């Protein structure tokens, strides 16, 4: 149990800016195993985003409360995944070879592709959350489960690429490299459990929402195939981009399913 707590706090330290016990350090072995808790981090981030929306929705317009909840999720993660998405937009938008794409993604500066992509992504996320809240405005419980499910299943989609594809860079220049070195069935099972459980609970109230798995993982498979084609695998930025895209796909798909099924 003590070891599992250490692994969990390693995941919390790596994927968020939430304070952890001082005894937790960057142990490569634990960082490998921490991937099993990546979707669980989604529970925390999604829960915090919901709480911020819930509290501010009492005194402000829903749209402002949504923006504040988005800000909260960015602050909690340190824009970890948004940064990856912007780097992927720059890299794949401006590079035409594997080497060039990887060099551009490694550059800390954000370019036109990254800036435009990030703006459009955040607009889609805002509109998706706005419409989703309008659809389920009569139930804060369902809304809470939707927030948590969106963050957890999108992280499951992202981390699953580690289980099916190889790491693209040949050096250890990326901070995600230790995650890519090894994994066991515990990481696969743990990721599936924490990634799917909120959605399974949500489907107990609205069974049709279970269908959201199809578009989310369709987006995941398309992105993984695209990354494989151009850079022969994935990088940490690719995982961040996948998480962001799949989160938005989850919100939009949930709205469509709710309306038409």
Image (cartoon, rainbow, N blue to C red):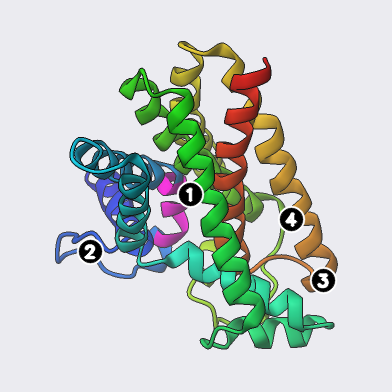
Q: Is residue 14 left or right of residue 183?
A: left
Residue that label 2 marks: 24
Q: Where residue 116 appears, x then y in whole percent?
A: 62, 72
Residue contact between numbered discs 2 and 4, judged by CB atoms under 8 Å: no
Q: Is residue 86 left or right of residue 14?
A: right
Magenta span: chief secondary structure: helix
- Lower sequence index among marks 4 and 3: 4
Which residue was labeled with disc 4? 224
Q: Residue furthest front?
A: 61
Q: Nearer the observer, disc 3 or disc 2?
A: 3
Q: Residue furthest left?
A: 22
Q: Badge 3: few (under 14), some or many (20 or more) residues near its Cα, within 10 Å? A: some
Give coordinates of residue 112: x percent, y percent.
64, 82
Q: Which residue is mark 1?
A: 126
The residue at 79%/80% (across/down) is 98
Q: Residue at x 44, y 66 (%)?
A: 80
Magenta span of residues = 31-38
Q: Is residue 139 above or below residue 116?
A: above
Q: Position of residue 159 (x, y in %)?
A: 56, 51
**N-terminal-most mark, 2 or 4:** 2
The residue lying at 63 percent from left, 33 percent from top is 253
Q: CA distance from mark 2 to mark 1?
A: 35 Å
Q: Secondary structure at mark 1?
A: helix
Q: Please identify the quadrant where the C terminus is shown.
A: top right
Q: Does the magenta segment cover residue 95?
A: no
Q: Is residue 186 left or right of residue 98?
A: left
């Amino acid at each position: 149990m003590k070891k599992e707590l250490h692994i969990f706090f390693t995941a919390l330290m790596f994927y968020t800016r939430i304070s952890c016990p001082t005894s937790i350090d960057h142990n490569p072995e634990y960082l490998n195993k921490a991937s099993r808790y990546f979707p669980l981090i989604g529970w925390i981030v999604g829960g915090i985003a919901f709480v911020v929306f819930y509290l501010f929705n009492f005194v402000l317009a829903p749209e402002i409360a949504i923006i504040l909840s988005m800000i909260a999720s960015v602050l909690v993660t340190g824009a970890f995944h948004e940064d990856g998405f912007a780097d992927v937009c720059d890299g794949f938008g401006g590079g035409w070879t594997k080497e060039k794409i990887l060099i551009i993604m490694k550059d800390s500066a954000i370019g036109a592709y990254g800036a435009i992509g990030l703006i459009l992504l955040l607009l889609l996320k805002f509109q998706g959350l706005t419409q989703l809240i309008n659809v389920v405005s009569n139930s804060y419980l369902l809304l809470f489960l939707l927030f948590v499910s969106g963050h957890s299943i999108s992280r499951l989609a992202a981390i699953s690429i580690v289980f099916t594809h190889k790491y693209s860079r040949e050096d250890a220049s990326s901070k995600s490299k230790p995650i890519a070195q090894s994994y066991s069935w515990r990481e696969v099972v743990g990721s599936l459990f924490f990634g799917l459980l909120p959605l399974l609970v949500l489907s107990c109230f609205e069974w049709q929402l279970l269908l959201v798995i199809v578009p989310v993982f369709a987006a995941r498979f398309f992105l993984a195939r695209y990354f494989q084609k151009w850079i022969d695998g994935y990088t940490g930025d690719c995982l961040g981009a996948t998480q962001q895209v799949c989160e938005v796909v989850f919100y939009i798909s949930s709205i469509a399913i709710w309306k038409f099924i």
